Amino acid sequence: MQDFGMKGLNMRSKKIYACFLYLLAGLYLSGCITVTPKEDPVKKDMNSLRQEITAQQQRLVHLEEAVKKDVAVLGKETEAQKKKIETTDETYQKERAGINASIDRVREDMAFLSGRLGEIESGTRKTGEDLGTLREKTADKKELEGRLNSMQGQLAGLEGRLASLSEKVAALEQMKSPPAAKEASIEPDKQETRPQKPDELYDEAIRFIKEKDYSNAIEKFTRFLSLFPGHDRAANAQYWIGEIYYAQKDYERAVLEFNEVVQKYPKSAKVPAALLKQGMAFNELGNKKEARLIMERIIDKYPKADEAGRAKKILKGMK
């Protein structure tokens, strides 16, 4: 009897449990009960990393765009600065060329006046000249000395301007070309000689003239003409070679050197001056006929040049 009761109880329990399972199944199927799966921590970390990578990529894109804009602006500013430097450099170079030309003209005038003073001083020492002639030469001498002193002042001013301008040009050159890295030290006898710039070589020759070191001056001018035959100061260099020989009273060689100016640089502004000194050299050699022809040629071909006025005075003195 007791066993029968236990069996009946078990049967009821099983029925109740089965009913409970059916009820749960019905609720789950109807959506009243949901089961949330447990999130995978590795998958969560991967998703977080993907999001961070995406954010970093977006930042990188923004940075690249900002850098491109900055580079574009900097490029424009650099180009503008470069053009400004080039324009300024060109202006300085033109101004320096003008100053150099002025200096050459003043030096030539001074050389001519010095020659005339020498002729006057030599003439006043000769005997047999009347008092009127001596007085005239003395007056000419004073006038020439005054002009010579004035030109020396002009020359000093021009050289000062040239020095200042050369400093500005050097500063621009440094701006245009960044300083090169220091090279390893090389023994002096193994170092290559830096090629001279044309203006440096020309100015060095002029310095030798000032020091009356005529042989070195001729060597530098000759080297200048050999290295830079088409330079705009080539005619001046050739002219100065003639001037040196004239100053040394080597009139025959002076005639030949001045003729080089006329033949090689026929369109140069130095031609009238070269012809004048060539005529004066002929006159010193006693070739009055050739000297007169050259003076007449200057007056006829270059009537507005200063040399034409000088040629007229020389012709007047030759009669």
Image (cartoon, rainbow, N blue to C red):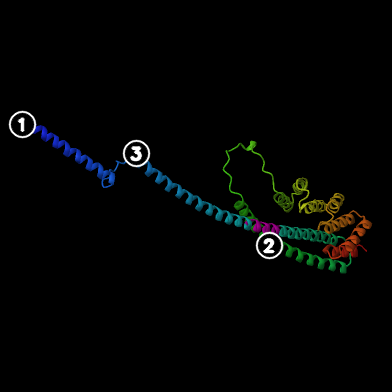
> Magenta span covers which residues?
85-96
Which amino acid type is marked by label 2? Gly
Amino acid on which the number 1 mark rests in the picture: Gln
Q: Is any part of residue 312 visible from this angle? A: yes
Outermost residue to the left = 1
Seen at 79% across and 65% down, the residue is 144
**Distance between mark 2 and mark 3 Cα atoms:** 86 Å
Residue at mark 1: 2
Q: Nearer the viewer, mark 2 or mark 1?
A: 1
Q: Which mark is residue 42?
A: 3
Q: Quadrant of residue 182?
A: top right
The quarter of the picture where residue 102 lies is bottom right
The stretch drawn in magenta includes residue 92 = yes
Q: Earlier in the sequence, mark 2 or mark 1?
A: 1
Q: Secondary structure at mark 2?
A: helix
* Magenta-colored segment: predominant secondary structure: helix
Looking at the image, which is closer to me, 49 or 38?
Answer: 38
Q: Quarter of the image for the N terminus: give it.
A: top left
Callout 3 amino acid: Val
Q: Residues within 10 Å of mark 2 (few under 14, many from 20)?
A: few
Image-based side of 50 in relation to 23, left or right? right
Q: Which residue is mark 2?
A: 157
Depth check, mark 2 against mark 3: the one in front is 3
- At horizontal 66% and vertical 60% (from top left) the residue drawn is 161
| Depth order, front residue of 286/191 | 191
Q: Position of residue 158 (x, y in %)?
A: 69, 61
Quadrant location of the C terminus?
A: bottom right
> What is the secondary structure assignment of the residue under circle 3?
helix
First reached walking from the N terminus: tag 2 or tag 3: 3
- Tell me which label, 3 or 1, sits earlier in the chain: 1
